[in-house]
Image (tube, helix red, strand yellow):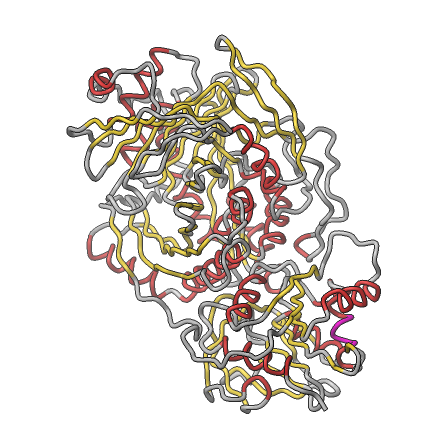
Amino acid sequence: MIETISDIRVLEGYHDDQTLFNILCQLRLRNPQQDELMLISGGPINDRSKTSMIPMLGDLRVIFKQPKDEPQATHQDPLNGNIDLSKNPPLTLEVQQRISDQWSIKSIESHQSLEQALRSMRKMETLASSEPRTGLSPGGFAGILGYDLGQWTTGPRLSNPPPAGEILGVMWKTNGWIIHHRDTHSISLVGVKNISSTDIQKWAHIDHSSTELTEPSSPVSIESRSEHEFKTREIIQAIKHGHVYQVNYGRRWEAPLENDSWSVFSKLSRANPAPYSSWMRSPSLKWSVVSASPEQLLRIKDGIISTSPIKGTTPRGKDPVEDAAKIDSLITSKKDLAEHMMLVDLERHDLSSVCEPGSVVWSDFRIESHPNVHHLVSTVEGLVAQGSELSSVISSLFPGGSITGCPKTMSMSIIDHLEGISRGAWTGSIGHINSTTGIADLNILIRTLDVRIKDSKNIGSVMAGGGIVHDSIPSVEVEEAEWKADAITRATWGAPAFKDDLSPPTAEMGVMALPMPLGNDKNANFTLFQKTPKIILVDNLDSFTFNIRDAMVALGSQVEVVEGRPASSIEDPHTWLKRILSEYTPDGIVIGPGPSRPEASERTMLIASNALSDMLSIGNRRIPVLGICLGHQALCLADGSRLEPSPEGPVHGSPSRIQHRGTGLFEDSDKTCFMMRYNSLAVVSEGRTMIPNAWESGTRLVMGVEHPSLPIHGVQFHPESAGSGGGSRIFYKFLETCIRPQC
């Protein structure tokens, strides 16, 4: 890593949102074959949309490619909970150098994960002076990470991988930045050489915008409305059987592109300004991307990471009265609020895996109004853990939960199964990363046009969809996907995404803060433990596991996460259990939640049966066990209870009123409390020994059990959820049990 000094210049004067468009057009005139990237913020100015920027792309780029000769996943039936968890073949990383306007291969690398690939790029970075306001400096990377790179984060083995050698992403080393500060209307030039301030000032005011389109053509939907509805119903059935909580399914429209994609971007940015819009063009790679995205994947600065997920969407009203009614309907919708709550918990989990324990908070909840739609948006943030590298932080969140589902691994497998094609740019990310400064900013590519040259033709594709939950109405989900796609298809081809004119009206943008739902009891006063409880937490492919770890660590425990459903293992479950008990000498075991039935995890069922048989101990000390959701169900199954689809239907992301006896883990808890649930299956009969001690008010559905003599407890709800009131007390009582002297 070589330290360099950047030239930093500030150009005062009035520069509007068209400024960077004009400058990029002038840069293109100087070199029509250059690679281009632009990150644009539009609409109201706030903390997330203060700046727009053009990274000056250097002579080094890193291309992510689908490996060759990849065998497809086998024996997969994700709609019934069966997925291929075997490792994907190594990701191909091609490092290219530009010499005399020609790109040539410098080296080819293989990496087992996206985290490893991003970490390898650090050695190519250089350290330079930063622009004070943004922290941006030359020497890092900027570019695109396509969705299909999720194969090397949390994703499973795919049945429909991209073709061998397909470009999945590209990152360019940056030589400088042209930054437009929207709040002060000034321009900062960082490391921009060979271009005078006078030229930049002149270029900024030469309008090159063009919104003229050729004769309209009709984009073709890859699947029909009826096919879309059928697949939606399949997802709903998978949810009802407990295999997944939510799936974000997408549908594709495709057609030759007669219009220049730059004209499309110019038109779209004016008609649909968004805080995380972006433009990417590489003539040599025959690829361009246009996006008017409103969503942020992550921002990292000063050791703080934040994410702003979107979940819950409604079209704008035709007039102010109807528009206000649309907002009211959105913020009172049990379905939309449940979806959003699920996403908040998922993002808390993703951040907790790389942040300091106890630092992750749900800090903001709001309505964001865009020209065509209203969104429910939250901000979740945390302090990056000491020793966590930028590469691991990005990999923990990519791809975003709002565009995959929950739990991530299962939902991504279902997406692959039902969509049947690679997503390409859509739901990936565009932005910048710099490991030397610890700064990163990446969007989520929704409202996006992906253009590639195929058979000498520019082929544009648009994907749109939404989150499917148990009470989704298939016809409504189809309509939502169509009006989400509509703004992009009209800007691209001058034609709607569907025959019926269901396009939402347009209106002014804005932000409205919403009251935060009552959450967990983090401010409760708990007596510090004299001894640190050592806990093993069994992860069953859930997207809330690290929320559980975080909650218990915040109470003073030490938690080790172990795999409940490994991809493969040379150890049989008995050998595995013996080894981890010897290796960790835990004071307690928590069997975590997860998709499908408990029998999918032999390790989980073994712990449950051994605990109930009084065969789970270290020396003369019994090891206390807490089962959460699937873990609770495992204990009840091992005790002889029946597990069936919940008689009252699935509950995902909604709180239930819990009544209890005040015994076991409910000792000292309020007589009634509200706890968040994520379950489609429920215990419907009593077992041999476990005693119910908590129920859902009204339905009397069992929500908690305890053993009459052994330290074994189960809860159907999720005490770690941000929406559970009193959840920390449940964990505290269990930890007390773990260090309590035993007779």
**Observer-nearest of 230 and 75:** 75
Q: Main secondary structure of the magenta part?
A: helix
**Observer-nearest of 516 and 557:** 557
Residue 271 location, x and y as percent? 28, 35
> Quick check: can you spot residue 321?
yes
* Extreme residue in the left direction: 13
| Residue 668 as seen in the image, left or right of residue 418 | left
Residue at x 51%, y 21% (from the top left corner): 60
User: Across the whole image, how many numbered discs are drawn on residues?
Assistant: 0
Splitting the image into 4 quarters, where does residue 56 fall? Answer: top left
Q: Is residue 185 magenta?
A: no
Residue at x 31%, y 45% (from the top left corner): 372
**Magenta segment, which residues?**
606-610
Residue 395 location, x and y as percent? 55, 45
401 above or below 631?
above
Residue at x 36%, y 56% (from the top left corner): 376
* Extreme residue in the top direction: 100
350 above or below 583?
above
| Residue 629 as seen in the image, left or right of residue 604 | left
Q: The C terminus appears in which quarter of the rendering?
A: bottom right
| Residue 664 as seen in the image, left or right of residue 397 | right
Residue at x 48%, y 59% (from the top left corner): 348
> Quick check: can you spot residue 702?
no
Residue 509 location, x and y as percent? 25, 46
Residue 178 location, x and y as percent? 31, 27
**Observer-nearest of 455 and 58:** 58
138 above or below 572?
above
**Observer-nearest of 54 and 687:** 54
Splitting the image into 4 quarters, where does residue 109 fall? Answer: top right
